Image (cartoon, grey):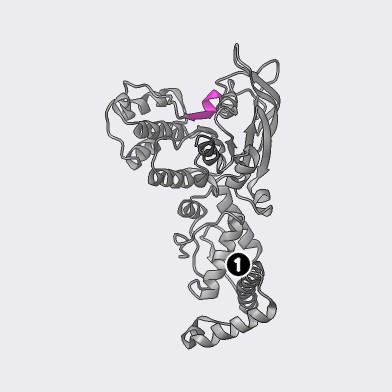
Amino acid sequence: MVEIEKLYFTYPNYKTVLENITFSVPTGQIVAVLGTNGAGKTTLLKLIAGLLVPDGNVQVKIGGKTPQEISGEIAFISEAGTYFNDLTPKSYGNFLQDFFPSFDSTYFDMLLDFFQLEERPIKKMSKGQKAKVEIAAGMAKRTPYIIMDEPFVGKDMFTRQDFMQALAGTLTGEETIFITTHEINEIENFVDRVIILKESHIAIDITLDELRLQGKTIQELMKETIGYQENSLCSLLDKTK
Amino acid sequence: MLDFTEMVLNTSEPVYTQINKFVKRQIFLGTAKKGDPLPSRRELATQLKINPNTAQRAFRAMEEAGLVLTPKNTVSILYFDEDMMLEIQREMTADIVAEFVKKSKENKLSFDEVMTLLRQEWEKGENNEKYIKA
């Protein structure tokens, strides 16, 4: 169970990014954290992962403990990458094994194989290949909490679908997962719940079952909530005529 | 083994409901037989790219409906008797009619217009008959 109550977060010399965030997530739930760029998605994920600390005395609680206390049980998979550039995928795997007791090197090798990654320094890889190393490393930690920040960035449609299949096939159902993405299509039938952030607040927090009872898709919910205007570019072009 | 690889998920119903309907449809069409084994929960999750808890939930729903039996320590198998088969047939037919009526109303057709069109279409192709079961 992940519990967050009345959480605020402000970056130094910057405006408040998150305000009065309250929600709890039961073990095994898969949550999509959505919103426009700058809505605070990555910040929220970093707070859950323990990479940032909330304002004041409020703390994120995971099974009653702080994320820092259980950092070995959390995998943070980020678009920015957490690997070391000079290492090859396999040597990076060896490194991780020393740090994460639950690191599953068989699974890691399988994922490297699955993603068709060659043994060469990560810094020489393409953006998409780097993202694959990041995902393989994160998943192979076999942690009960998985936090994915834009895992699909730099990956084509087929790789995205393959990745979803690999993910679906390797989860046990016990993992609690948070995922941010702009690729809504890939997750429409995968996540259990959607939280939409807007202007530092939670605008929507709904389960997929409830959403479908209302006859809506995540796409439609996004449009409705963040007020995406389909023809905004057209009206801009009209003005410049 | 019941194959789910051809199943296309929509975004309007809960996934477990869709799986349940898919299985019933296979029974209705005769492609799934009583006693056929089902994939494991993990295989189902992989085939449909869904999360394992959703696969588990689909199994539970089908078990509760008596459609799937999971004897201890063995694979789940499909089960249905005469009554269940009749119920499935009724359900599948009702679905088609409900969808048809909904679309007809959306197109602002009157009941009489629909009946006329239906008769014309029905009599147009005799070949169609073999595809339509009551």
Q: Residues within 10 Å of mark 1 (few under 14, many from 20)?
A: many
Residue A63 or residue A226, whichever sits in front: A226
The image position of residue A54, as x and y in percent, is 64, 19
**Residue A181 visible here:** no
The image position of residue A159, as x and y in percent, is 39, 43
User: Relative to residue B77, is residue A194 depicted above or below?
Assistant: above
Q: Is residue A132 magenta?
A: no
Q: Is residue A153 left or right of residue B9?
A: left
Residue A111 or residue B132, whichever sits in front: B132
Q: Is residue A72 magenta?
A: yes
Residue designated by label 1: B67
**Residue A32 visible here:** yes
View extreme (front): residue: A241
Residue B48 or residue B42, whichever sits in front: B48
View extreme (top): residue: A13
The image position of residue B42, as x and y in percent, is 49, 51
Image mark 1: chain: B
Which amino acid is tagged 1?
Leu
Identify the residue shown where x is 57% and y is 24%: A43
Q: Give the magenta-colored segment's residue range.
A: A70-77
The image position of residue B64, as x and y in percent, is 66, 62
Which quadrant would residue A179 be assigned to in this image?
A: top right
The secondary element bearing badge 1 is classed as loop
Which quadrant would residue A140 be assigned to in this image?
A: top left
User: Relative to residue A92, is residue B113 depicted above or below?
Assistant: below
The quarter of the rendered structure image containing the N terminus of chain A is: top right
Identify the residue shown where x is 52% and y is 25%: A72
- Count the labels in the image: 1
